[in-house]
Image (cartoon, rainbow, N blue to C red):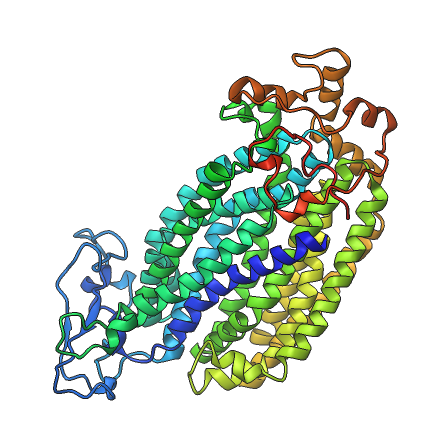
C-alpha cells in the first residue's frame, strides 16, 4: 500500500498545485497595466468584452505601472474579442440587464482581490458543470481494482474504455453552458457586472482543458489501479513546473517583461486571461505525453487490455458500469454544489471574503486535498482488489491502515502549516485586506479538510464494496442540508458579517464535517463484507471465466475478456490463477506478493504476455 500511496500523494499534490499556481499568479495582479479586462460601458456593449492592453511609452518609468498615460483598447480580434452571449434582437428589452457601473480607467484598474474573486467564481461555475462527467473516471479505482483481484484482468481495460466513452459523451453539453452562460449566471446570482465580466472571460479561456483533463484522469486511475502509479507522478511533477513557467510567460510576459520598453520583444503578458491559457496548454500536453509513453512506448496497457474494438459497449457491461457510475454523478454534483453554494453564500460578505476564502483554499488544499485524494484512491483500489479476491479480512485491514495514515498526516500538516500560515497565504495573494483574513482561516480549514478526508475514505470504501448509491444518499440526506444549512443560518438568520463572521462560518463547517465522519463510520462498521465480495466477483464476470475454463472454452485457460483480446490483438494471455478454484472456494487463499506490481520496472507490462501481473497485490 505504501508503494501505491506515496506516488499517488505526490501526483495529486502536483495536480492541486497546478490549479493553485493559476490562483497565485492571478492573485498578484493589481492594476490594468497587466492586461486588464475593462467591463462594457453600456447595455449594447455588454455582449462583447475587448481585451485592453497598455502601451507603455519609453519615457515612462517602469516602476510606476499605475501611472500609464496611454492605455488603448485594441480593435476587435477573433482571439481577444469574445462575445459573452449572442447579439440582442431588435426587441431586446434593455431592462433585462441592469446598466453596469462606469468602466474603470487605467488609474483605477482592478485590485488583486477582484482578480482573485473573478477567477474563483469562474472556477466555481466550471467545477459545478464538470462534476457530473468526472464521475465516470472516479469509478475506475474500485472497478479496475476488483478486475485485477478477481483474476480477470482484461475487464480492467473494458472499464477504462467505458469510462472514456461516457466521459467524453457527457461533457459536451456542459462545455456549451460553460462557454456561453458563465457571466450571465453570475449576474443572475447578484454579482457585479465588473466581476461577472472577468469571470465569464476566464471561463471561456478555460474551455480547452476540461475534456483532456478528464481523459487524463481516466488513464491515471486505470494504471494506478493495476499497480503503475509512478509514471503519472513523474508526469505531474514535470507539468507542475511547466505550468508555473507558462503562467509566468502568459500572465506577466516571462523574460520579455525585462526587455527595454522600446525593444520589439518587450511584452508584459496577457494578464488575467494568461492563467487559463497556461492551464489549458499544460492539461492538453500532459495527456499527450502520458498516452504516448504508456501506450506507444512502454505498452503498459497490454496485460489488461481487451483489444481495440467495441465489445465494451455490450448491453450487460454498460448496465453494470452505469449502476456503479451514475450514483457517483449525483454524489459529485451534490458535493460540488455544497462547496460552491457555500462560496456563493460567503460572497454575500463581500469581495474580500471571497478572495480570502479562495486564498486559504488554494494554500491549504494543495497538500491536504492531495493527501485526501490519494488516500481515497488507495482505499478504493485496495478494498476493491481484496473483495475481488474474496479476501474480506485484507479489505478491512486496508481500510484501517488508510484511516490511521490519514489521521497522522492531518496532525503533521497542522503542525507544519499553522506556524507558517501567513507565509502560505501570502503565496496566493498580496491584497492587504484578504491576506491577513486568509491567515485566520487556516486553522478551521485544516480541521475541515482532515474531516473531509476521512469522509472521502469512507466513500471510497463504499465504492470498493460496490455501494456507490449509498454515497449519493449520504450527500443528499446529510451533507447537502447540513453544510449549506449551517452557512444559511449564520449568514441570513444570525446575520454574521465581517472578518469575525467568516471565521465563525469556517469553524461551523469544520464541526459539520466531523459529524459526517461519525455517520460514515457507523455505516462502514455495520457492512456485510462477504456479500459485497460475492457481488464484486460477479460484476467482474468471474463465473463466466470459470465456466469457460472448466468447459474448455475458445482458448483453454484464457479468461473471456482475454480470449476477446487475443482475437483482436494477437496476444494470448494466460490466466494468473485458476478462476474455477477461486469460485469453488468462495475465498481465495493468501497469494505470493508480486513485488513488481508497484515498482514500475520494465517487465511483462512492456509488451509481454503475463496477464497476471498486478493480480497478487498485497495490502
Location of residue 571 in the rendering, given as x and y in whole percent from the top left corner: 57, 23
Location of residue 201 in the rendering, given as x and y in whole percent from the top left corner: 31, 61
Location of residue 300 in the rendering, given as x and y in whole percent from the top left corner: 55, 38
Evaluate whether residue 204 shows in this view: yes
Q: Is residue 56 above or below residue 168?
A: below
Image side of residue 512 versus residue 163, left or right: right
| Residue occupying image coordinates x 44% and y 68% | 21
Q: Quadrant of residue 261?
A: bottom left
Q: Quadrant of residue 335?
A: bottom right
Image side of residue 140 versus residue 74, left or right: right
Q: Is residue 417 above or below residue 173?
A: below
| Residue occupying image coordinates x 45% and y 39% | 168
Evaluate whether residue 495 shows in this view: no
Tell which of 435 and 141 is nearer to you: 141
Image side of residue 512 versus residue 173, left or right: right
Q: Is residue 402 above or below residue 381?
A: below
Residue extending farthest to the front is: 602
Location of residue 70 in the rendering, given as x and y in whole percent from the top left corner: 13, 80
Q: Is residue 410 above or below residue 582?
A: below
Instruction: Count numbered badges in the picture.
Output: 0
Tell which of 255 and 35 is nearer to you: 255
| Residue occupying image coordinates x 61% and y 76% | 505
| Residue occupying image coordinates x 73% and y 11% | 552
Amino acid at each position: 500500500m505504501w508503494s501505491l500511496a506515496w506516488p499517488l500523494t505526490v501526483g495529486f499534490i502536483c495536480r492541486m498545485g497546478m490549479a493553485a499556481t493559476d490562483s497565485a499568479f492571478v492573485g498578484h495582479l493589481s492594476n490594468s497595466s497587466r492586461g486588464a479586462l475593462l467591463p462594457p460601458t453600456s447595455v449594447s456593449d455588454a455582449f462583447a468584452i475587448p481585451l485592453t492592453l497598455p502601451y507603455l511609452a519609453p519615457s515612462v518609468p517602469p516602476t510606476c505601472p499605475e501611472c500609464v498615460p496611454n492605455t488603448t483598447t485594441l480593435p476587435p480580434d477573433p482571439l481577444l474579442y469574445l462575445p459573452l452571449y449572442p447579439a440582442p434582437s431588435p426587441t431586446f428589452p434593455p431592462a433585462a440587464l441592469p446598466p453596469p457601473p462606469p468602466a474603470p480607467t487605467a488609474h483605477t484598474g482592478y485590485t488583486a482581490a477582484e482578480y482573485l474573486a473573478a477567477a474563483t467564481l469562474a472556477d466555481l461555475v466550471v467545477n459545478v458543470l464538470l462534476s457530473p462527467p468526472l464521475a465516470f473516471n472516479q469509478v475506475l479505482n474500485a472497478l479496475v481494482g476488483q478486475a485485477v483481484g478477481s483474476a480477470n484482468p482484461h475487464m480492467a481495460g473494458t472499464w477504462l474504455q467505458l469510462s472514456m466513452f461516457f466521459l467524453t459523451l457527457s461533457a459536451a453539453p456542459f462545455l456549451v453552458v460553460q462557454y456561453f452562460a458563465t457571466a450571465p449566471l453570475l449576474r443572475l446570482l447578484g454579482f457585479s457586472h465588473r466581476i461577472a465580466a472577468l469571470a465569464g472571460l476566464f471561463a471561456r479561456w478555460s474551455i480547452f482543458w476540461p475534456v483532456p483533463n478528464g481523459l487524463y484522469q481516466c488513464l491515471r486511475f486505470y494504471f494506478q489501479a493495476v499497480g503503475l502509479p509512478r509514471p503519472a507522478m513523474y508526469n505531474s511533477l514535470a507539468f507542475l513546473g511547466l505550468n508555473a513557467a507558462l503562467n509566468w510567460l502568459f500572465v506577466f510576459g516571462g523574460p520579455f517583461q525585462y526587455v527595454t520598453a522600446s525593444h520589439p520583444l518587450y511584452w508584459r503578458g496577457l494578464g488575467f486571461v494568461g492563467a487559463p491559457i497556461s492551464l489549458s496548454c499544460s492539461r492538453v500536453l500532459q495527456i499527450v505525453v502520458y498516452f504516448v509513453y504508456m501506450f506507444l512506448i512502454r505498452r503498459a496497457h497490454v496485460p489488461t487490455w481487451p483489444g481495440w474494438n467495441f465489445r465494451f459497449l455490450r448491453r450487460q457491461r454498460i448496465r453494470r458500469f452505469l449502476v456503479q457510475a451514475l450514483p457517483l454523478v449525483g454524489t459529485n454534483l451534490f458535493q460540488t454544489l455544497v462547496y460552491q453554494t457555500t462560496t456563493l453564500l460567503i460572497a454575500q460578505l463581500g469581495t474580500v471574503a471571497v478572495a480570502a476564502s479562495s486564498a486559504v483554499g488554494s494554500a491549504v488544499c494543495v497538500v491536504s486535498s492531495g493527501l485526501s485524494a490519494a488516500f481515497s484512491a488507495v482505499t478504493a483500489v485496495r478494498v476493491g482488489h481484496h473483495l475481488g479476491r474474496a479476501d474480506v479480512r485484507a479489505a478491512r485491514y486496508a481500510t484501517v491502515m488508510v484511516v490511521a495514515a490519514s489521521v497522522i498526516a492531518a496532525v503533521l500538516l497542522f503542525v507544519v502549516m499553522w506556524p507558517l500560515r501567513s507565509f502560505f497565504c501570502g503565496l496566493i495573494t498580496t491584497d492587504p485586506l484578504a491576506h491577513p483574513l486568509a491567515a485566520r482561516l487556516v486553522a478551521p480549514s485544516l480541521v475541515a479538510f482532515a474531516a473531509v478526508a476521512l469522509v472521502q475514505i469512507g466513500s471510497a470504501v463504499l465504492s470498493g464494496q460496490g455501494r456507490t448509491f449509498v454515497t449519493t444518499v449520504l450527500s443528499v440526506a446529510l451533507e447537502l442540508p447540513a453544510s449549506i444549512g449551517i452557512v444559511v443560518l449564520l449568514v441570513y438568520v444570525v446575520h454574521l458579517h465581517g472578518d469575525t463572521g467568516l471565521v465563525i462560518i469556517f469553524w461551523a463547517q469544520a464541526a459539520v464535517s466531523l459529524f459526517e465522519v461519525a455517520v460514515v463510520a457507523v455505516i462502514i462498521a455495520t457492512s456485510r463484507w462477504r456479500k459485497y465480495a460475492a457481488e464484486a466477483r460477479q460484476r467482474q464476470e468471474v463465473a463466466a471465466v470459470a465456466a469457460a475454463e472448466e468447459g474448455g472454452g475458445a482458448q483453454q485457460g484464457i479468461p473471456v475478456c482475454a480470449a476477446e483480446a487475443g482475437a483482436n490483438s494477437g496476444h494470448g494471455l494466460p490466466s494468473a490463477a485458476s478462476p474455477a478454484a477461486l469460485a469453488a472456494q468462495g475465498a481465495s487463499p493468501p497469494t505470493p506478493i508480486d513485488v513488481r506490481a508497484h515498482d514500475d520496472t520494465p517487465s511483462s507490462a512492456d509488451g509481454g504476455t503475463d496477464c497476471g501481473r498486478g493480480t497478487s497485490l498485497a495490502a
